[in-house]
Amino acid sequence: MSADPAKSARRPILIVVVEYGELPEMLRVADILKQSLQKEVIVFFAKCHYRRLGEDTAQVVARGHRWIDWRGAMLGSPASDLPGEEDAMDGGERASRRPSWLRAALGDLIALLRDSRNFRRRYGEVVAILGSTAPSLVIVGQDLIGKELSFALIAAARLGIPSLIVPFAMFSTRELAEYALARPEHHVGTRPLNSLLAAWYPRWALRHEIKTVLRLQGSRGLALEWSGLAGGNPWVPCSEPATAIACESRVAMRNFMSMGVPQSRLRVVGSPVFDRLAAALETGRAGRERLMARHGLDSDRPLLVCGWPANIFAWLGGRRIDYPDYSGLSEAWARQLARVRDRHGAQVLITVHPKTLEGELDAAKAHGLSCERGGSDELLAHCDLFVTLNGSSITAWAIACSKP
């Protein structure tokens, strides 16, 4: 690649996203890069049938960035929303009654051929997009083995383009293991190629509780291995071949090191959201009064902020929990929060995860609870108590603000 500084200065930075939950933090990164480096930032929506494409591309354009669709078309105006479907790369997770061994072997073989073809095709398309945009830096918020984010990191490494992972959330091996444990198709022994993957490539297998589980089911893991598209450790988040990983704190750095990520790749640089938290804290009483007035709440009463539970029922597979479905869980949370408000005179505000659908807030609204999308930093800075069900990155933000 050319070392001409003038030519490098003209090349854009490419930020790759596949999930709309990534976008808020990635947009903060894009804004900082554009302002501080005076470089063009392009957002690559890499997933076919990306949900909320219209809304999210409108945010990108409103903040002065351009975007690329999954085919590589460069666009400067918002898109029309596409249906929230899944493309062929998201296959292989279908639940069905357990087939006979012969039928399962045939199904695995077909899946292996299909996945190998899809992986190679999509990787080739990502390589072409990186080649046509010629970025000076590729940035992702996670690596997601077997998906476009990992392909972008692998392609960047092979093309000699620097790459950076800016984790948009907290990741752990245990979370991956819990997901695999809840899905029988990830268990060694349930599919013919699962046992083969565990025997030939032991790094894909992990003993968790009473089961040996795979990071992906056998056909997909073998397809990635044989296609040369498994660059990292399947059980270590952010282990694909990135030049560096940005850590928001020394605690985050130690967490990555405990999972096996080399310290040489880790850089403690803080986080855009920490700057926003600090700015919100500095507004003090005046900031709290503005927040409460916006929602018609009494600023003299204690404020409880709830990180509204995300709907992860689709991830549970065959695992049973205390609630039969998401509506039952959300109704229970809304009822308890309303009881705290009515019995103890507390004010309650709900901060909504970007992936939460509007209909998933029906129970909260039915109980008269105020909900806010975005602005989590302001809510955390001015609350007296924070509560949540899902251990997400917002929990770390509350800890950073010293909130109980």
Image: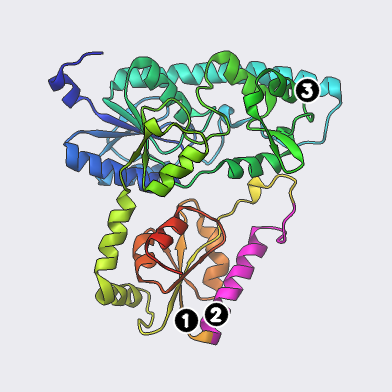
Disc number for residue 346: 1
In the rendered image of this protein, does residue 241 appear above or below residue 208?
above
Label 2 vs 3, first from the N-terminus: 3
Tell me the residue that label 2 is attached to. Answer: 340
Snapshot quadrant of residue 191: top right
Label 2 vs 1, first from the N-terminus: 2
| Direction left: furthest residue | 6
Residue at position x 70%, y 24% from top?
A: 198
Name the chief secondary structure element in magenta.
helix
In the rendered image of this protein, does residue 163 appear above or below residue 210?
above
Q: CA distance from mark 1 to mark 3?
A: 56 Å
Q: CA distance from mark 2 to mark 1?
A: 7 Å
Magenta segment range? 320-343
SS at badge 1? loop
Residue 13 location (% of width, % of height) = 27, 31
Question: Do the residues under discs 2 and 1 have CB atoms within 8 angstroms?
Answer: yes
* Disc 2 crowd, CA 10 A, few/some/many (<14, 14-19, 20+): some
Label 1 vs 3, first from the N-terminus: 3
Q: CA distance from mark 2 to mark 3?
A: 52 Å
Disc number for residue 192: 3
**Quick one: 12 or 125, which is closer to the camera?**
12
Residue 137 location (% of width, % of height) = 29, 28
